[in-house]
Amino acid sequence: MAVFSRRNILVGGGVLGAAALGGGYFLTRKKEVPIGFSLSKEELQNARAFLKKNLAFDSHAHPGRTFVKGATGLAPKLKLYKALGTFEKKAVADMKAGGMAAASFASVSDFQVLDLGDHGLSARRAFEPGEAFASYQRQIANLKALATNGLVQALYQPDDLARAHNAGAIGAWFTAEGGDFLEGKPERVDKAFADGVRAITIMHYRTNELGDIMTAPPVHNGLTAAGKAVVAAMNDAGMVVDTAHASEDTVRGVLAVSRAPVLCSHTHILGEKMPVMPRFISADLAREIAARGGMLGLWPAGLGISTLSDLIDRAFELVDLLGPDHVCLGTDMDANYKPVMETYRKTPYLVGGLLKRGMSEEDTAKLMGGNIMRLWRDVMTLRKGA
């Protein structure tokens, strides 16, 4: 959900000033963002045809913001955010219009304890006893209801994607952003898996029992003993470990103990142009993730970019750094900060732009869905007893 920093945001030079990270953006409706390039009628038709042949799968998203439904105990600004409501039917209609096949439908584990200040999201209070798990139970019930009511088709195993697509349904990959609801208890991983959760972003905007976040000073200096046990339990269950939002020391701790490849679902790379940027990771860490079979998600947050064309630049940067097998799509849709891809209806323009710039159809298919499906299959293959 969203993107914020505690203090290390550059001012000037086209990079976001701290004031830009206040609550105003999140308390308004999305605005249309310039594409930044043109496609001919034929190029757009080819992109749409490509999406019919190659299933597009978003590794991290909140389509329709289901996570706000029924939330209690919120800070005043988050109450206003909740008041904007949910819009799952519109989100799914956008996915169908844009040629998407599936996406993560993510809960937000720490939503109830967050607050929105001048420097962004952070935890304002501790959870009350039992509150974190109760919030998870509410959110996963709301997500599963989307499938029960026929709006989406849940994806519990990789082969479900083709079945959903053949049925004309949008696939919903249930995920959790933040491992707070686990409360450091690895046995809850099996409960979450039984609920249909297939990936957990172990950290979000609250330093929890598992490790440190990247947007606050370290408390644990990396992955904790409980974090190691949770990663092992996720490996055993066949659940994808998502390291987005985790500090680099925490991510390296995950890489040291995980026997399955990991995902960093929505981020980008620090470099000469962006030496300091909230929620970006070092090129060295990105290479370490890829070297172990994992991947990074192409993230359209408006941090240093302002058009869809800029996002395509970033796609090539990631592929050039990591190779075409280690980049997937991670839009953070419907809970992102100033997204340059603000609707799934622009998916054909993303595909058309990648192809027009010279990315091969094979590599574009990998980025748009093939890679995340391969990672999920690898994780399932390496689960205990497989």
Image (cartoon, helix red, strand yellow):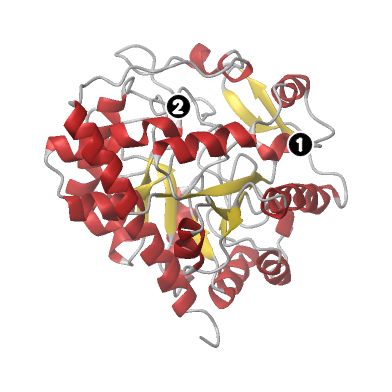
Q: Looking at the image, which is closer to me, 328 or 292? A: 328
**Which mark, by number, is residue 342?**
2
* Residue at horizontal 15 percent and vertical 45 percent from the top: 359
| Amino acid of disc 2 | Glu
**Which mark, by number, is residue 69?**
1
**Residue extending furthest toward the right:** 129
Residue 206 pos. (x, y %): 65, 42
**Residue extending furthest toward the front:** 167
Residue 62 pos. (x, y %): 58, 40
Q: Looking at the image, which is closer to me, 353 or 379? A: 353
- The quarter of the picture where the N terminus appears is top right
Examine the rendered structure and indicate whether residue 107 appears above or below residue 373: above
Examine the rendered structure and indicate whether residue 344 appears above or below residue 305: below
Tell me the crowding category of disc 2: few under 14, some 14 to 19, or many 20 or more residues within 10 angstroms, Cα based. Answer: many
Name the quadrant containing residue 210. bottom right
| Observer able to see residue 274 | no
| Observer able to see residue 210 | yes
Examine the rendered structure and indicate whether residue 363 appears above or below residue 79: below
Name the quadrant containing residue 38. top left
Task: Say what secondary structure mark 2 lies in.
Answer: loop
In the rendered structure, the answer to whether residue 331 lies left or right of residue 353 reads: right
| Amino acid of disc 1 | Lys
* Residue at horizontal 24 percent and vertical 49 percent from the top: 364
